Image: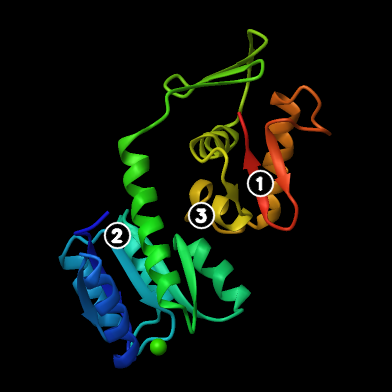
């Protein structure tokens, strides 16, 4: 996806220049703000597809900026730039509405790959919603929404349905717990990766023939989960 409107909020001029050059070369329109308040002003007064927010910023940090934009109803993508290995930062940002993370110092190719994936994901979700899906003895109709197994209705809670939808929309791909948190539980406080595990277990109980040896909702050791139809 090219020609996206991207706002970069980064106070280190050399890093800002590198990122702007990389993304401009891919056909994106990149605006730049060097402080938190300038970033907030820009993001409030123009419609961007994606915000790239450094965490450590003068005036207003990236987390606060992220939170304010979500509170204002911003529904585009938010990619945070964090220091390498700051797990606590990552978890905090997820709760505030960030979609993805990139640790500094980053590989330029990784930055462009993350941006492309994020923009594609957002566009894809808007363009090709799956309405019906069948796997094994289970049939799902997201338009109702309704789930049947061997023809009998299965009662799924709202979050279970959202998680199932996410798994089916991204079938075949390895999905990390953190990514699933951003997709299904975004903006909600007090949620941990364990929440994903619990909901996965519930889905298996309700949908798998043998929940202990699932055939569709698979565990990928050390990485996350993968759905296979
Ligand atoms: Ca900084």
The residue positioned farthest toward the right in the image shown: 212
Quickly name the residue at label 3: 182
Q: Which quadrant of the rendered structure holds the C terminus?
A: top right
Does label 2 or label 1 sit earlier along the sequence? Answer: 2
Is 62 left, or right, of 37 in this rendering?
Answer: right
Q: Which mark is residue 113?
A: none
Query: Pointer 2: what residue?
Result: 72
- Ligand 1 is found in which quarter of the picture? bottom left
* Picture layout, residue 168 above or below residue 52: above
Decide: few, some or many residues near mark 1? Use Cα within 10 Å; few <14, some 14-19, many ≥20.
Answer: many
Residue 218 coordinates in the image, percent (x, y): 71, 40
Residue at x 30% of width, y 37% of height: 127
Mark 3 nearby-residue class (10 Å; few <14, some 14–19, many ≥20): some
Tell me: residue 223, above or below residue 68: above
Res 35 visible: no
Instruction: Residue at the far left: name it.
Output: 45
Q: Residue at x 48, y 72 (%)?
A: 102
Q: Please tell me how crowded label 2 is: few (under 14), some (14-19), or many (20+) other residues with Cα within 10 Å.
A: few
Residue holding disc 1 = 225
3D distance between C-alphas at marks 1 and 3: 15 Å
x and y, in percent, of residue 5 in the image: 21, 63
Q: Earlier in the sequence, mark 2 or mark 3?
A: 2
């Amino acid at each position: 996806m090219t020609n996206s409107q991207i706002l970069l909020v980064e106070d280190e001029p050399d890093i800002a220049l590198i990122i702007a050059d990389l993304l401009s070369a891919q056909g994106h329109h990149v605006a730049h703000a060097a402080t938190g308040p300038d970033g907030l002003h820009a993001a409030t007064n123009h419609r961007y597809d994606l915000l790239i927010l450094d965490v450590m910023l003068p005036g207003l940090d990236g987390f606060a900026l992220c939170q304010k934009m979500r509170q204002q109803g911003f529904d585009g993508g938010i990619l945070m730039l964090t220091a390498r290995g700051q797990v606590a930062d990552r978890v905090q940002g997820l709760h505030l509405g960030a979609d993805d993370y990139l640790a500094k110092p980053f590989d330029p190719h990784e930055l462009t790959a993350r941006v492309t994936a994020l923009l594609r994901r957002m566009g894809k979700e808007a363009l090709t919603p799956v309405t019906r899906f069948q796997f094994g003895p289970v049939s799902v109709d997201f338009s109702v929404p309704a789930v049947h197994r061997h023809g009998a209705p299965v009662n799924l809670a709202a979050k279970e349905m959202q998680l199932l939808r996410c798994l089916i929309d991204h079938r075949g791909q390895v999905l990390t717990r953190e990514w699933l948190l951003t997709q299904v539980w975004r903006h909600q406080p007090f949620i941990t990766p364990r929440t994903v595990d619990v909901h996965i277990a519930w889905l298996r109980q309700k949908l798998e023939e043998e929940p202990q040896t699932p055939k569709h909702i698979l565990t990928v050791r050390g990485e996350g989960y993968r759905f296979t139809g």
